[in-house]
Amino acid sequence: MSKKRIGKICWLLSLFILLFFVCFPLVQMFSVSFKDTTQQFALPVTFLPKRWTLENFRQAVSYEAFRTYFKNSLIVAVITTFLTIIISLMGAYGFTRTHFPGRKVFLMLVLFSQMICLAAISVPVYRIISGLDLTDTYTGLIISYLAYTVPVAIWLLKGFIQGIPVELEESARVDGASKFQAFYRVVLPLLRPGIGAAGAYVFFLSWQEFLFSLIIMTDKSKRTLPTGIMDYVGQYETSWGSMMASSILLALPVFVIFAAVQKQLVAGLTDGAVKG
């Protein structure tokens, strides 16, 4: 057997092992959500339920707090996505079309902010939000999300703007359009793939974010869905079936949105990376 063939087999084996570790929790979550209590702890363990039941989903949906958490997550994710796109469009356009002293330094600082994990900045962010008296508010949580969604969106949109010839804007300016009109009528329509990619990415981040929601939203009625799922963990018992069903409902909007914009998202991320 040639070295090339052995290398290919090792690569496929490594890929299979990685795929198993990635997919196994999802398969287990799906399986438990359709099992009743007796099947969840039965031995030997079965991947597929012997008796399928929707009771766990019924309990999750009928839980009044679940609907509140879902609404909170939707409000925060949509507003965060909208504000991130607006701010990032202005920032990316300014970095791309305007040359000013220290531009590259500021760009590096924007990129550097993505190298710091959220846990490392959670305490400073909480102190800032607390000092502004914005704890337990949508505003405080959204501001904390903007701290890490805006930089990545700027870099993504910057790559798209660089791919748009500046001559198109200059032609519009010659025809009498203002700088804002040239951006709105010429650049913005061409940025739709980039806006779709950045918007979907930001929505995914803010929809499933856990840490900031946990430390900023102490009021139970203001919690988002990722932290609200912890309600199923009790002192003496954990409702695994309802928790897994709620987790599937939490992931469902992400799958639906990704299925709707997957071509735009993949093309957008690829084009942004190449042009950037």
Image (cartoon, rainbow, N blue to C red):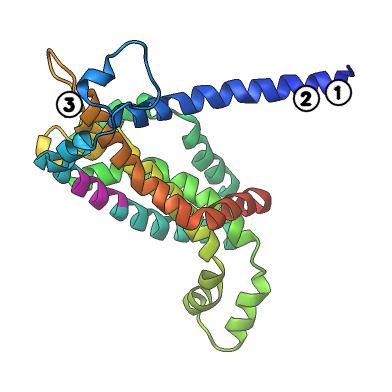
Q: Which element is circle 1 on?
A: helix
Query: Which residue was labeled with disc 3?
Result: 232
Residue 131: assigned label = none
Q: Which residues are magenta?
A: 70-77
Q: Residue at x 16, y 28 (%)?
A: 231
- In-image side of 187 versus 11 (left or right): left
Residue pictured at 33% horizontal, 36% vertical: 209
Q: Kindly indicate whether the residue at mark 1 contacts the one at mark 2 (C-beta within 8 angstroms).
A: yes
Q: CA distance from mark 3 to mark 1?
A: 51 Å
Structural distance between the alpha carbons of marks 3 and 2: 45 Å
Instruction: Please say if 52 is above or below 139.
Output: above
Which residue, given by chain and number where applicable, does mark 2 sit on?
A: 8
Residue located beneath label 1 in the image: 4
Residue at 57%, 69% (x, y): give it. 190
Determine if the magenta segment contains residue 106. no
Given residues 36 and 184, the one toward you in this image is: 36
Look at label 3 and name its amino acid. Tyr
Residue 12, quarter of picture:
top right
Residue 216, position as x, y percentages in the image? 20, 34
